[in-house]
Image (spheres, rainbow, N blue to C red):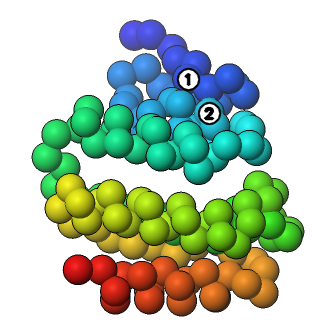
Amino acid sequence: MPGPTKICGCGKTASAGLTPVCSSSIWRSWSCYSEDREHVLREELPRLFNHVKQPKLAFYNAGTDILKGDKLGGLSVDYNGVKARDHFVLDMLATHKIPTVIMTSGGYSKDSYRLIADLAQHLLEMP
């Protein structure tokens, strides 16, 4: 049985035979590099939806610990960037009619609650 398979430039691994939930390109970009996260997401998420046919359920972890100034997250994404990520992901899931469980997590800054409220507002305004 083969050992771990390297799937990320920063050295993170996944066991052989396991399929990561997202593409290695999304993982590599969000975990290792600070620039162009939204651009990568906008390119890779549609590719994921083209690859995975008829998902029965999606779990979206709308973590806010990536927010700039969060003492534990360390990714320094600005407020509008986090909001754009959430809106884009939810809009894509709705477009593909994928039932979704949304989990909020992380977020240790004074603005985390605002991002969660913005996410709820976006959900209420969706068709």
Quarter of the picture holding the N terminus: top left
Q: Residue at x 38, y 29 (%)?
A: 18
Element under disc 1: loop
- Which label number is shown at residue 28? 2
Cβ atoms under marks 1 and 2 closer than 8 Å: yes
Q: Which residue is mark 1?
A: 7
Q: Residue at x 70, y 72 (%)?
A: 79
Mark 1 Cα within 10 Å, few/some/many (few <14, many 20+)? some
Q: Residue at x 75, y 78 (%)?
A: 108
Specify the amino acid type for callout 1.
Ile
- Which label number is shown at residue 41? none
Q: Residue at x 64, y 63 (%)?
A: 81
Residue 90, percent from left and from top: 37, 66
Residue 25, percent from left and from top: 53, 31
Residue 78, percent from left and from top: 74, 66
Specify the amino acid type for callout 2.
Arg
Horizontal relation, residue 31 to residue 104: left or right: right
Quarter of the picture holding the C terminus: bottom left
Rendering quarter of residue 36: top right
Q: Is residue 58 visible?
A: yes
Viewer-nearest of labels 1 and 2? 2
Horizontal relation, residue 7 to residue 78: left or right: left
Q: Is residue 63 visible?
A: no
